[in-house]
Structure formats: C-alpha cells, structure tokens
Image: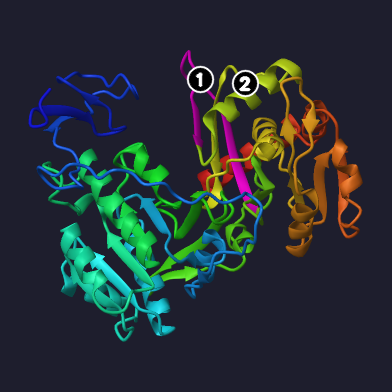
Amino acid sequence: MSSRDPSFVCQNCGGVYGRWQGRCDACGEWNSVAQESATSLRPHGGGRKPRKGCSIALEPLAGATRSPPRLASGVAEFDRVTGGGLVRGSVLLLGGDPGIGKSTLLVQVAAALARGRQRALFISGEEAIPQVRLRAERLGLAGAPVELAAETSIEDIVATLSEGETPELVIIDSIQTMWTDTVESAPGTVTQVRASAQILIRFAKRSGAAIILVGHVTKDGQIAGPRVVEHMVDAVLSFEGEGSHQFRILRAIKNRFGPTDEIGVFEMTGGGLREVANPSELFLSERDLGSPGTAVFAGIEGSRPLLVEIQALVAPTAFGTPRRAVNGWDPNRLSMVLAVLEARCGVRLSGHDVYLNVAGGLRIQEPAADLAAAAALVSSLANAPLPPDAVYFGEISLSGAVRPVIQTAARLKEAQKLGFGRAIVPEAARSETTGGEALSFEFVERLTSIVTDIAAREKSPPARHHQREQQREKVSVA
C-alpha cells in the first residue's frame, strides 16, 4: 500500500486496516473504524534519509539516586493525587465527563501556581480567551498572572513555548482539538492525537516544563483516542462525579512518580471547586439514621481512610427475572455477594429486585466492602435497621467465610475519630484491633453469623401490622 493511499484506523485502539470493516479485530469495538490518510509522521522531512544511529552510554543499575524535583501547585488535594506535586518535565492526562469541572480545576491550579511566582500557561483549543477570562472572574481568579492563548496548532504552540523563559506549567485544553501538519488527518483522529501528544511529550522532556493534557471521554467513560497515549504520558488522572451530587473525585489511575488509586475530594460550589479536608464527615453528613438497608463502610482509597454509607433496597419483583441495579460498586461483585447469601446463608433473593447505591456519588473499588454490602442487603430484606454507630468491613469468599483486609488499624482509627462505637470486622483481624480501645468489636468468621444477628432484629409481623394501621388512620384523618 502506498504511503499516500487511504487507510482505515480504529478510533478506539488505533488498529490499522486496508479497508473498512464494521468491527475492529484488535479491541472488538463496533463502528469505530474510520478512514484516514496513511501518511505518518515525517520527522526527517520529505526526501531526507534517516540518519545513521550512534552508540549511547550505558550506566549500571547501582548508583546515586534522588527524588525527582516537584512543583507544589498550592491545591492540597491535587498535590495529594499527584504524589506531592508536579514533577518537572512530566506529562499528565486528565479525563472526565463533559461539564464535570476539568477546566475549572485546572484554572484554579494554574492560578495557584502563578500566584506563587511560577510561570503558568493555559492554552485553550475549545474556548476563546474572553470565555476563559469569564470563568476566572466567576472563580475570583481574574487577578492571577496566568498567561492565556487560544491556539490549536502544535507547531505554533511549541514555538511560542520555546521563546523566552521556560514555563513551569502548561495546560492544553484539550488534546483532541490539537493538530500537527506532520499528519494529514482531521483533528481528533487517532493519528492526530497520538502525533500531537508525542510532540508535546518531547518538548516537556527537553525543556523541563510540566504539561497537563485534557482528554475527552467516550460514552463508556474511557478517555477518547488511542490507548497508546495513556502509555506515553507519566500520569493519568480521572475527574469523576455526578451532576446530582456536589462532590467531585480526582483519582490517579496511573502515576509513574507517585501512588496509584489515590483520590482527592472536592466540592463544587458557586465559587468553584472547594477542597474537602475530611471527606468521611461530609459523606456521612446526611445519613438517615434508623432506616433499614443502610450500612457504614470503613474503606481505604489510596492512603486515605474513608467512611461512606452503602444503601440497599430489596423489594419483591413483579417480573419473572428480578432486576439488579448498582451505582458506585462493581456489578459483578454484587452478583457474587447475592449468590453467597443465597447458597451459603439460605437468604432467598431470587424473587426480589435488588438495588445498591454508594451515597455521595463515590465509586468503591476494593473488595473490603463485601461485608457492608451484605449487611445492608439483609437489613433491607428483613426490614431491620442496623446499629447506627457501627461500621463494617471485610471480604467475603465464595465459601461464605469473612476474610481480613489491609490497613485495619487505619479504618478503625477513622471510625473512632468520627464517633462510631462499634466495628464488625473479620475474626482474622483480631490481632490488629489492639489500638481501638474506645470501640467495641464484633468478630465474624462466617457470613451466616451476620445474617443470624440481623434476622434477630427483624420487626415482628404484629408490630409491622400495627404500623400499617397507624398509617391508614393518619391517611383517613387527612
């Protein structure tokens, strides 16, 4: 195939084909193959032969090392996620749903750096300069010495950045709008995104400037463009949240210079994003005490202990196949817990619809939430409220055993700090509970003991009948 012949490229994974096909063989996506020019990067220019390679110096593995120099942004939650600040010469990729607050967060980071006498540039390919200024005025950051530009040509951007003093931070919003004349395809295509990112990464490594690239996401929540871009950058951050909640979660998916799965918590207000220093207290601020189907889970996100409320609703189904809906947790994990409850504990859920929700819009990833989810499910089915001062954590195996989890002491310390008095923990974690003298512990070895304890709290039928009669009387009086 000639270098000028058209090729067909998968917009999801970057796979190249000689003709169009409905399904990409590499990633399995349908309707993701689009026509592009087959012309690739031409780093040597037309007609020039590539230079001959030369030998490079090799160094031993053992040698003097030092931590990479970091640049604190002044936004504590952002610095926590990046591992203590931006590493000079690093490239970060920030993804998130449209309207979630990516540009707002980066404007605040750029303003905080600029006020610390660091040179920060914000280059927008989606908004004009007056629009960026309006956002800064709304956030109260109009006086910050941030330099702005509205440009989409990578060559012009790199030429501008190479003049004068090297900036400490460069923000590109967004990488899907950038284009380079070394590639003959439209902006936003796989080839353009990959080539533009490669040029910016080379500039960052050469100059020492930290670059943050904003990336669009697909309908599945994945960052749009080829996955190779995520491998090229030094860190991948995800900005998560729901429009119905004011909380926003900044999560590190990949970080070459810091921990992964670290989170930063923000609250979206009229004046922008506000850092949340104690997210556990905020997530539990609107608890419905005494309501069946709610359990407090003591979790760990990155290095931070976090207490969240897990809500469950179990109701008789009106259809042959019961419905299973979950928000904020792995649906496969929920299916496993339901199967263990039915097979090992005798809890019949095949005739009930099951709904599970993590309050506050948080997404839980660790298996330590199994015990709290199971307790909430049984509590809802039995119509028996759980103790309001109790926290739950533990992993459930397929045999029905409750397995220990990591960082038990940190979870208990956070629960004690927020005033909880009881902790339901795995039996194997007994040796790690010596530091929680203010807490009373209930050690469980198998899930059946939790089910039996909750079933004993079930409201008696006469009591429920009396409550229904009282409700009927209130309705008739009204």
Q: Residue 426, image x and y in percent?
A: 82, 38
Q: Residue at x 14, y 19 (%)?
A: 19
Q: Earlier in the sequence, mark 1 or mark 2?
A: 1
Whether the residues at callouts 1 and 2 have beta carbons within 8 Å, the answer is yes
**In the image shown, does 469 or 105 lie closer to the viewer?**
105
**Residue bounds of the magenta highlight:** 307-326
> Horizontally, is 8 left or right of 69 in the view?
left
Q: Which residue is mark 2?
A: 349
Mark 2 belongs to which amino acid?
Leu
Q: Is residue 310 magenta?
A: yes
**In the image shown, does 140 or 209 lie closer to the viewer?**
209
Q: Secondary structure at mark 2?
A: loop
Q: Can I make out residue 478 in this image?
A: no
Q: Quadrant of residue 452?
A: top right
Q: Secondary structure at mark 1?
A: loop
Q: Residue at x 73, y 63 (%)?
A: 418
Q: Residue 279, image x and y in percent?
A: 59, 62
**In the image shown, does 451 or 70 lie closer to the viewer?**
70
Q: Quadrant of residue 150?
A: bottom left
Q: Main secondary structure of the magenta part?
A: strand
Q: Quadrant of the N terminus?
A: top left
Q: Which residue is mark 1?
A: 322
Q: Residue 24, image x and y in percent?
A: 27, 22
Mark 1 belongs to which amino acid?
Pro
Packing grade of label 2 (10 A; few <14, some 14-19, many >=20) is: many
